[in-house]
Amino acid sequence: MTMKKLYLHTVFISACFVLTLIPVTIRSQHTIKTYPVSFLFHRKMYLSYEYHPSTSLISFGLLTSSYLRTTINEYQGFDVSPFVKITMGEKKLPNAWYFEPRLIWGYLYANERYGYEGAAGMNFESFSIDFPIYGFGFLLGKQWVLKNGFTLGIDCGLKRVFRKIPESFEQSGKTYEANQPVFLFTTWQMGPGSIFDGHISIGYTFPFVKK
């Protein structure tokens, strides 16, 4: 990953914390969360911030995630997801059932196969490229506020992710064409292009209000 992309990723994560410092009404609440299960099994680091207005059934937030390349995950990079959480039922967030639509935008770095026409037919080589991803998704979930403001959450849903990679390029007098120039991005299990989406989160809500 280039220094520019690392810098952008740092800016996005820092923005989550900066948002918590914005002065808002005293009765509003904020939640900062992370997702340890995703890191343990998929080497994906999450950090999210949520703002819960005191007079609304809708919460607003931003989720940032970073992919670490491993033997089972060939992608490295990050994505950012602004979202809203709509309360389902009588209780209000941060302690309630919710429906969460969200948008997805990010940047990934990976090895992609490109082929060129040789004397004996097609020949293939791998090239390291970076490319943007974007998409949308939704989640259904439940979040609990535990003793002293700590939170536990679980959700599941679906998402669709798209990508844009170079379909062909010239190098050393050869024309290389992408082996799989797919617009719809689909990857393994819980990878960046997975259709299924789900999380287990832990975090902290402040200021803590006893019910």
Image (cartoon, rainbow, N blue to C red):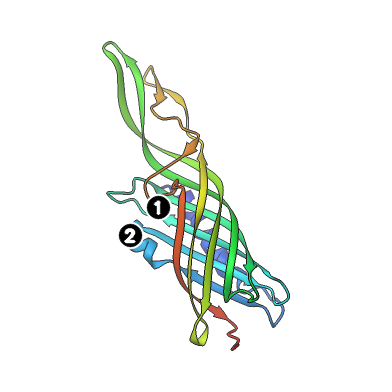
Return the residue nearer the eye: 108 or 33.
33
Quarter of the figure that contains the C terminus: bottom right
Element carrying mark 1? loop
Can you say whether 77 is above or below 179 in the image? Answer: below
- Residue at horizontal 41%, vertical 23%? 177
Q: Is residue 167 left or right of residue 124?
A: right
Element carrying mark 2? helix
Task: Check disc 2 and give the amino acid type.
Answer: Phe
Check disc 1: other Cα within 10 Å, few if <14, some if 14-19, many if 20+. some
- Measuring from the top left, give residue 129's x and y in whole percent: 41, 37
Can you say whether 191 is above or below 24 in the image? Answer: above
Q: Is residue 114 left or right of residue 60?
A: left
- Residue at horizontal 41%, vertical 30%? 180
Q: Is residue 9 left or right of residue 76?
A: right
Can you say whether 191 is above or below 90 in the image? Answer: above
- Measuring from the top left, give residue 165's x and y in whole percent: 47, 34
Return the residue nearer the eye: 172 or 86.
86
Q: Quadrant of residue 89?
A: bottom right
Task: Check disc 1 and give the amino acid type.
Answer: Met
Task: Check the image and name the residue furthest to the top.
Answer: 119
- Measuring from the top left, give residue 12's x and y in whole percent: 54, 59
Q: Which residue is mark 1?
A: 190
- Residue at horizontal 51%, vertical 36%? 164
- Asked if the residues shown at circle 1 and circle 2 are in contact, with their CB atoms under 8 angstroms apart, the answer is yes
Q: Which mark identifies residue 41?
A: 2
- Measuring from the top left, give residue 193's x and y in whole percent: 45, 45
Task: Check the image and name the residue furthest to the front.
Answer: 89
Check disc 2: other Cα within 10 Å, few if <14, some if 14-19, many if 20+. few
Alpha carbon distance from label 1 to label 2: 9 Å
